[in-house]
Amino acid sequence: MSVAVPLVEHFARGLDAPICLTWELTYACNLACRHCLSSSGRRDPAELSTAEAKAVIDELERMQVFYVNIGGGEPTIRPDFWELVDYATAHHVGVKFSTNGVRITPEVASRLAASGRGSGGVPRSGYVDVQISLDGATADVNDAVRGEGSFAMAVRAMENLAAAGFRGFKLSVVCTRHNIPQLDAFNAIAERYGAQLRLTRLRPSGRGADVWDELHPTAAQQRDLYDWLLDHGENVLTGDSFFHLAGYGKALPGLNLCGAGRVVCLIDPVGDVYACPFAIHDAFRAGNVRDAGGFRGVWRESSLFQTLRGPQAGGACAACSAYDSCRGGCMAAKFFTGLPLDGPDPECVKGYGQLRLAAVEPGSAPKPSLDHSRAAAVPVTLQRRRPDRACAENPLALVVR
Amino acid sequence: MRPEPFGALLYHFGTRRLSFLKDRRLLSVVEALADAPSARAACAGAGVGPSELQAYERALARLAETDMLRERAR
């Protein structure tokens, strides 16, 4: 059973359908996180209707997409949220949804806990998993980014889930300059509630571009994070967040590859399909689920996705010894900081990104194509919100050959 | 189980683990298991030769260990 081509190369060339995808159901949000990658706040009048959303689920079922990461905005404030969750699980599409916890009451938590238990202990086909967003292990660190009261709200949701017996939900953290010293504390919180920690990378996407300079980890912190992940990585989910850190030497657990348009993508609330959740910009828009060919047509035929699945030019990075491991880093991070896509990541572990950033003319970086932030400028310490999630579980958990 | 050009992707909704079959023939074997009289017969039916049997046995055992394969009800 020898295989000439490494699995990761198959992934780089794209799959017949995504392994999972992110689906943001609404741009509406009760919070207004400073680093929100989708600049959420207000609902978009063109958001998919219930019937349209169900048609997308039908298509995902036909394509055998195993699960979707539902986010927003705050997805649970969509009036048909639970209807769509039930519809997806009934159609063999698993759901993992990200929430700030606003609707995770004791009643909802009980319902969610019951949904994961099939009869006779047999796991049901189609399931619901929950991801609670928290960006500080303490209220001060968290609320400075996510808004006053958001720490307490998330903790309440975790208490409710734990009390209802929901085991193994996810505690989802975007790594910032202020919370990287709290990694052990996050792990302790996860343990306290029987949850699993999930770490993702801060991207300069959406409102994240406005706070990038202030919040992205320092070079020393990146190294701390890398070392921490080497020690704890097997039990911590990272999706494809940190493959740029592989440039330090050892590959981290998780997907060491940019999955954009290859194994993951984003469907936004109005049905636009983007290469990844961090790239809400026309340059990365592959099509719309309302197009004649539907989602399948976009996934299989969009010229953008075809290009992403083709050979990538290393550009300035090609000569670097780390290129084979980091592959030049995150496309979205480069794009929204004004760096060329075939050059180093702004957080390149070799420091090349920093050098390049110094040469970017202030204000010249592309702006997100959409902004649903609430019009009234809210002081930065108030209600903020941010969703996250690329692909979720460690996708390389088990390779059978 | 979702066939892919390189083999197949398997997803377990209970453990939420993703597994990969890196071989189309292994996919054929797994697909044949439910109706074949034995795993050996499923392998033979998919064209697995005697010299390769051990490798396929290991792969199937790994899938059984991780609950991706279950003994059928008798």
Image: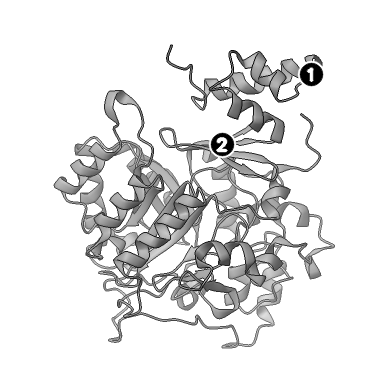
Image quadrant holding the N terminus of chain A, namely top right
**Front residue (pair A104, A11):** A11
Residue identified by numbered label 1: B49
Describe residue A107's horizontal placement relative to residue A204 as left or right.
left
- A228 over A47 or under it: above or below: above
Residue type beneath disc 1: Gly
Location of residue A70 in the rendering, given as x and y in whole percent from the top left corner: 38, 57
- A275 over A391 or under it: above or below: below
Describe residue A179's horizontal placement relative to residue A321 as left or right.
left
Q: Residues within 10 Å of mark 2 (few under 14, many from 20)?
A: some
Asked whether the viewer can see residue A155, the reply is yes
**Front residue (pair A297, A159):** A297
Task: Write down the chain letter for disc 2.
Answer: A
**Front residue (pair A103, A90):** A90
Q: What secondary structure is found at the residue carrying circle 2?
A: loop
Image quadrant holding the C terminus of chain A, namely top right
Q: What secondary structure is found at the residue carrying circle 1?
A: loop
Residue type beneath disc 2: Ala
Location of residue A95 in the rendering, given as x and y in whole percent from the top left corner: 38, 49
- B57 over A397 or under it: above or below: above
Q: Which mark is residue A15?
A: none
- Quadrant of the rendered image containing residue A364: bottom right
**What's the distance in space between the residues labelled 1 and 2, CA to CA?**
29 Å
Location of residue A265 in the rendering, given as x and y in whole percent from the top left corner: 53, 61
Asked whether the viewer can see residue A204, the reply is no
**Front residue (pair A299, A241):** A299
Residue identified by numbered label 2: A397
Location of residue A158 in the rendering, given as x and y in whole percent from the top left corner: 26, 46
Residue at the spot 51% in from the left edge and 27% down from the top edge: B68
